[in-house]
Amino acid sequence: MTGTTRSSNGLDDRRKRLLFRCWHRGTREMDLILGRFADAEIANLSDAELTELETLLEVNDPDLYAAITGDKVLPAVANLALFARIKAFPITDGNL
């Protein structure tokens, strides 16, 4: 897989921007983790969840990856419900 499988058609501008940002993080691992989550969930996220996603996207890739893999605790995001959903989201491609 090389990128998004979801079209941005039908999404509002905020969701379109977030979908793009999830797939263009700077590291391939984070593109795959956040991008796949966004492909599956972006259309159904509430405004509060979109705000949480924006908060997560402000964290630099190495720190966020370490938090997702459990190698580091980031107090700023550890209690976000969306962070827990992303951590639990299945990565089905063996490329990671």
Image (spheres, rainbow, N blue to C red):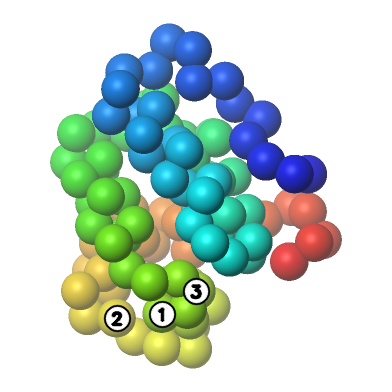
Q: Mark number for residue 74?
A: 2
SS type, badge 3? helix
Q: What residue sits right under mark 1 in the picture?
A: 63
Q: Percent position (x, y) of residue 58?
A: 29, 62
Q: Do the CB atoms of the residues marked 1 and 3 lie less than 8 Å apart?
A: yes
The residue type indicated by label 3 comes to Tyr
Mark 2 vs mark 3, CA separation in Å: 11 Å
- The residue under the point 47% across, 38% down is 20
Depicted 36 relative to depicted 42: above or below: below
Q: Mark 3 points at which residue?
A: 65
- Between 79 and 31, the residue placed more toward the observer is 31
Query: Which image quadrant: the C terminus?
Result: bottom right
36 with respect to 50 (left or right): right
* Mark before the other along the chain sequence, 2 or 3: 3
Q: Position of residue 30 (x, y in %)?
A: 55, 62
> For residue 90, what is the image quadrant?
bottom right
Q: Distance between the residues labelled 1 and 3?
A: 5 Å
